[in-house]
Image: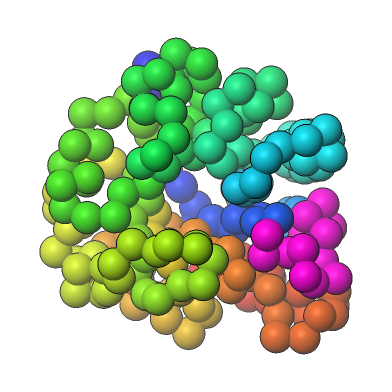
């Protein structure tokens, strides 16, 4: 069962690997993002999950639930179901049909990187697609080829599903990405300020929420 879902223009992703070398904890970033006006949050942990990550994700789920916004777990359908969260899966994760059996009543997003993947995902039981990287990115160890703004504009007509652009997007170029056809921009490292200061973090998240 697909769910009628329209992603907000700003889609912040709390990535544990990106935050580890900083002073910003995932829970604090989640609280600041919600306070700034974020309407969705994704928790992304690419390493092995332990009790610590589950507790962290659970705390962020509570923050989102209290604020009435959507919380999404990356990759792990089992934890998404336990946390009553949405789910975002990639090309190497559980296939969409299997994921839908686990989280039957939740929003599911699915990553795509090129025309063939977009076409194949049109009939998949998912509620939105992501496409990227739009620009060069350091948030992924082995990134797919850059799509670019021209590529985004050409690929947008291939799917009627909401499309979330990801990869190398900044406050300076986000408006161009949206103008090229994206419904939303997913931001990982770009949510962090250049200096490790919580006041600047709040300021930058507020700027993103004003997209």
User: In this rendering, does residue 31 appear at all?
Assistant: no
Q: Nearer the viewer, residue 46 or 58?
A: 46
Q: Total of numbered circles in the picture?
A: 0
Magenta residues (range): 17-29
Q: Is residue 180 above or below residue 197?
A: above
Give the residue at x 70% y 85%: 194
Residue 15 x/y as whole percent: 65, 56
Give the x, y percent position of residue 62. Answer: 80, 35
Between 18 and 142, the one lying in front of the other is 142
- Looking at the picture, the colour scheme in use is rainbow
Report the residue at 73% width, 64% height from top. 19
Location of residue 195 (image quadrant): bottom right
**Res 151 → quadrant:** bottom left
Q: Position of residue 200 (x, y in %)?
A: 78, 80
| Horizontal arrangement in the rendering, residue 114 relative to residue 15 (left or right) | left
Left or right? Give the position of 26 relative to 186.
right
- Residue 20 is covered by the magenta coloring: yes
Answer left or right for 37 relative to 63: left
- The residue closer to the viewer here, 53 or 151, is 53
**Residue 138: % across, % down:** 51, 72
141 part of magenta stretch? no
- Classify 6 as above or below 108: below
Say which residue appears at 82% left-offset and 66% top-offset.
24
Name the quarter where the N terminus is drawn. Answer: top left
Q: Residue at x 43, y 28 (%)?
A: 94
Report whether residue 97 is seen: yes
């Amino acid at each position: 069962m697909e769910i009628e879902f329209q992603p907000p223009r700003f889609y912040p992703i709390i990535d544990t690997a990106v935050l580890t070398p900083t002073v910003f904890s995932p829970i604090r970033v989640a609280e600041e993002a919600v306070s700034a006006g974020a309407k969705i949050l994704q928790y992304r942990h690419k390493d092995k999950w332990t009790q610590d990550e589950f507790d962290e994700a659970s705390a962020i789920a509570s923050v989102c639930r209290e604020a009435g916004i959507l919380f999404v777990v990356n990759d792990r359908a089992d934890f998404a179901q336990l946390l009553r969260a949405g789910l975002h899966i990639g090309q190497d994760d559980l296939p969409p049909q299997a994921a839908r059996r686990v989280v039957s009543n939740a929003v599911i997003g699915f990553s795509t990187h090129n025309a063939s993947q977009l076409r194949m995902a049109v009939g998949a039981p998912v509620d939105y697609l992501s496409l990227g990287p739009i620009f060069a990115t350091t948030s992924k160890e082995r990134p797919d080829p850059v799509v670019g703004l021209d590529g985004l504009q050409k690929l947008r007509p291939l799917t009627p599903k909401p499309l979330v652009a990801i990869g190398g997007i900044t406050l300076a170029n986000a408006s161009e990405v949206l103008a090229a056809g994206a419904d939303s921009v997913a931001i990982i490292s770009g949510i962090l300020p250049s200096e490790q200061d919580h006041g600047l973090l709040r300021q930058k998240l507020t700027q993103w929420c004003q997209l």
